[in-house]
Amino acid sequence: MKDIETMNTNRKTLIAALVIALLAPLGALADDAHHKPASASSAAADDLTDGEVRKIDLEAGKVTLKHADIKSLDMPAMTMVFVVKDKAMLDKLKTGDKVKFKVVNDGSKFTVTEIQPAP
């Protein structure tokens, strides 16, 4: 009978040790996230790419941008046409404007989801 009790105690101890071992890295990650609040805002800034407006097609909802490397898409600097998420985004742009923008690959096309004047 003592052997069964010892086995159960050993099993419980082993399970507790495994749970602690598995959860410890998660705690470290949570602590790390709480100690770096500034990185969240800088990460958002890193999502924006520098560009220059070359052409605007209001009717088609497209903008041609000469842009720097788009790190989030692993795309080198070039000039290309993008679809915009909302045609109203184009109302405040004019050819030659320096901008910062965010683009996503929605599977079939590259879409500008955010665009703002460059500081």
Image (tube, rainbow, N blue to C red):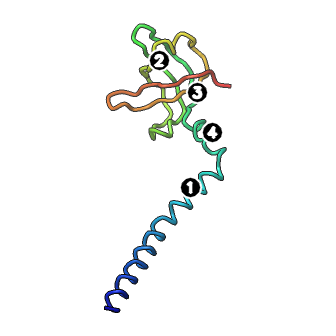
* Type of amino acid at the residue the image marks with label 4: Ser
Instruction: Look at the numbered disc 3 and give the secondary structure of its residue.
Output: strand
Count residues near mark 4 (Cα–Cα under 10 Å), then give few for <14, some for 14-19, many for 20+: few
Up/down of 95 relative to 8, above or below: above
- Quadrant of the frame with the N terminus: bottom left
Residue lying at 45% horizontally and 75% vertically, measured from the top left: 17
CA–CA distance in space, label 4 to label 3: 15 Å
Count residues near mark 2 (Cα–Cα under 10 Å), then give few for <14, some for 14-19, many for 20+: many
Residue 59 lies in quadrant = top left
CA–CA distance in space, label 4 to label 2: 27 Å
Which mark is nearer the camera, 4 or 2? 4
Q: Nearer the viewer, residue 106 or 93?
A: 106
Q: Are marks 4 and 1 in contact (CB under 8 Å)?
A: no
Q: Which residue is mark 3?
A: 100
Going from the N terminus, do you reach mark 4 or mark 1 first? 1
Q: Which residue is mark 2?
A: 63
Residue lying at 58% horizontally and 27% vertically, measured from the top left: 100
Up/down of 48 relative to 27, above or below: above
CA–CA distance in space, label 4 to label 1: 17 Å
Instruction: Look at the numbered disc 2 and give the secondary structure of its residue.
Output: strand
Q: Which residue is mark 1?
A: 30
Q: Residue 112's x, y, as percent?
A: 47, 25
* Type of amino acid at the residue the image marks with label 2: Val
Which mark is nearer the camera, 4 or 3? 4
Residue 41 badge:
4
CA–CA distance in space, label 3 to label 1: 31 Å
Residue 81 badge:
none
* Type of amino acid at the residue the image marks with label 3: Lys
CA–CA distance in space, label 2 to label 3: 13 Å
Residue lying at 48% horizontally and 39% vertically, measured from the top left: 72
